[in-house]
Amino acid sequence: MYIIGHQKERAVLKETLDHGNIAQAYLFTGPQSIGKSLCALEFAACLAGEPDFEPSEEKPHPFDVMVIRPLEVTKRGVTKVKNIPSESIREALSFLSQFPAGGKFRVLLIEDAHRLSETAQNVLLKTLEEPASSAVIILVTHEKGSILPTVLSRIKQVRFGFVPQEVLAREFGNEEASDIAPFFFSLGRPGMIFSALRDPAAFSVERELLGGLFRLSTLTLSERLLLAEKMAVHTERTVRLLEWWLPGLYQQSRQRTDRKQMIRFFELFEEIEATLRLLKTTQSNTRLLLEKLLLSV
């Protein structure tokens, strides 16, 4: 996996490095699966004195970089993602307090920072208020609204956008990706294509489920219930599928001229977004939420 696109954002970060104008904390924000985490790791490696660093299984990040991400927990066949607890942040801050071994900085990179518990964010806030000169913190998220305003006010934000369709088509326009990549070109998310190429079987399942969502109006009651059951096995995947479904529905709504149909599309958008909020912020039963959503269409 490597970075595709984001030349403008990476150029700005390189200029920051060249001029030595380093902030104590950054927020890399933008849509999911577009390459924010890869850009964050690239920036972190430069700060840690390893600009040519290439991640591997043996060494996933530079010595002076610590990466924190949420844990996935499977219980009774259902996989959910846990919030990052305050204990993890306290351990990471101990790492940051040590003197860098290679470069000028030690870096804490927090992926899916929207999964930081409120307590964890408050622990982090204390460090942001009194930062060490040799410490840099990078938060990566596609849900900026989940970060406390007090934290946001103390970090420099870097916004990333979708990768243009023509860039993805040029990058993945080969035989190996021919059956997979076009499905994602219009979504502008190279991370999805990498995932599909790495695990075609899992991609096949996701494509089947997403196809069911787009054909929802033609499905029978029992088929909708079966679709909800299959999706509910993995909550994080369910969130991804619903987030992928939304832009496609938006494109469909733009082709409608009937007022009643357009109103129904907007009602559906609101229902999907409400379901997403519950899935992300509560411990609600994923299957029941999906059944309610899919049967309402």
Image (tube, grey):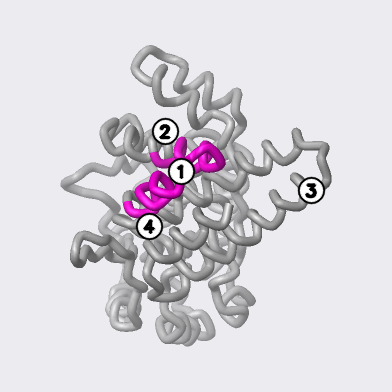
Along the horizontal axis of the image, is 48 left or right of 76? right
Q: Is residue 220 above or below residue 98?
A: above
Q: Earlier in the sequence, mark 1 or mark 3?
A: 1
Q: Secondary structure at mark 3?
A: helix
Question: How many other residues sit within 10 Å of disc 3, few (<14), some (14-19) or many (≥20)?
Answer: few
Foreground: disc 1 or disc 3: 1
Q: Earlier in the sequence, mark 4 or mark 2?
A: 2
| Label placed on residue 236 | 4
> The disc labelled 2 sits on which kind of residue?
Ile
Foreground: disc 2 or disc 3: 3
The boundaries of the magenta stretch are 209-229
Q: Which residue is mark 3?
A: 260
Q: Which residue is mark 2?
A: 193
Q: Residue at x 46, y 83 (%)?
A: 118
User: x%, y% of residue 41?
Assistant: 40, 51
Q: Secondary structure at mark 2?
A: helix
**Residue 43 in view, yes or no:** no
Which of the 4 image quarters holds residue 196? top left
Along the horizontal axis of the image, is 188 left or right of 68? right
Observer-nearest of 198 and 208 = 208
> The disc labelled 4 sits on which kind of residue?
Glu
Q: Is residue 272 above or below residue 214?
A: below
**Residue 178 in view, yes or no:** yes
Q: Which residue is mark 1?
A: 220
Foreground: disc 4 or disc 3: 3
Q: Earlier in the sequence, mark 1 or mark 4?
A: 1
Observer-nearest of 180 and 166 = 180
Majority SS type along the magenta span: helix
> The disc labelled 3 sits on which kind of residue?
Lys
In the image, farthest residue toward the top: 175
Q: Disc 2 vs disc 1: Cβ atoms closer than 8 Å? A: no
Q: Is residue 188 above or below residue 118?
A: above
